[in-house]
Amino acid sequence: MAPRSGPLTALMTVGAVGAAAAAWGMGVERHLFTVRHHVVPVLSSGSDPIRVLHISDMHLAPWQTRRREWIANLASLRPDVVIDTGDNLGHPDAIPAVRSALAPFAGLPGVHVHGSNDIWSPRPRNPFRYFLGPSERTKAAPLLDTQGLDQVLEGELGWYGLNNEAVTLDVRGHRLRFLGTNDPHHDLEDWEALDASAMDAADGSLTIGVTHAPYRRILDGFGDRGADMIFAGHTHGGQVRVPGVGALVANCDIPLAQARGLSSWRHGAREIPLNVSAGLGHSVYAPVRFACRPEVSLLTLAPRP
């Protein structure tokens, strides 16, 4: 009597599917850059709309020419303001790549905050540890050239650093008041410093919170300060998602259903629009995306009905 081949066939099928998914995620999908479009009615009636380009988690390395050129071409979208929610660097020598990618945005109003990979170099990690909770910084991780990055973003592009600071910008006839935190993933937010900075920033018709990692405490902190909208990144949208299920991890405590895209953050009686970008990149040690294309968001802030 011939041995039963059912279990072996099933195992081979599972292995083949896994190999095909890995090949797709590593060889194809991580290069399928996408622009997500949203309309958010948060402006006063009769106002001119504002086009906001939300860039996050580029994780650029010197050899990533395709990603760099795609980012540079985003200037053709003609945004009115750019919001960069951090993790621009994916390699210690990536500052020239960041400069090249973002050079077309020079002179355009913009703000940015730091993520952990704007401060510390990425290190190899066991991906299964993310199921145990948010990652911790490796004590041996070398420092990146954060000052050099800020010189590009602020000195060359003219953007404002919002690392525990506030600023008010005039954009298309609107006064936008931005409140930002330094990387919350490593507890670098400083609300006292932010509040002190906000006292020197003029009031605006719209208050926008900007952070790298959308921890609940940070989103609530912006809610306490009257934010009308919040922008964040960090989660990579889960990076590897299960079709029909969604993200399995977010590397912070945000509800998994809100780990990517436009949603609402409830704060007291208020519903605050929250955009969490799945980001454009990945760690050089985990070059894969599955059911989660690399992305930027183009949001049209529109008048309320």
Image: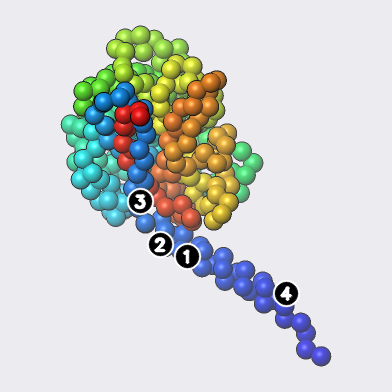
Mark 2, residue position: 28
Which residue is rendered at x = 55% and y = 47% of the image? 247
Q: Are marks 3 and 2 in contact (CB under 8 Å)?
A: no
Residue topped by disc 1: 23
Mark 4 or mark 3, earlier in chain = 4
Q: Nearer the viewer, residue 265 or 16?
A: 265
- Disc 4 residue type (three-letter): Pro
Q: Is residue 70 visible?
A: yes
Check if mark 4's residue and mark 3's residue have beta carbons within 8 Å: no
Kindly report the distance in space between the C-alpha atoms of the residues bearing marks 4 and 3: 40 Å
Q: Quick one: label 1 or label 3, which is nearer the N terminus?
A: 1
Query: What residue sits right under mark 3 in the picture?
Result: 34
Compare residues 258 and 118 and report the one nearer the observer: 258
Q: CA distance from mark 2 to mark 1?
A: 7 Å
The residue beneath circle 4 is: 7
Count residues near mark 2 (Cα–Cα under 10 Å), then give few for <14, some for 14-19, many for 20+.
Answer: some
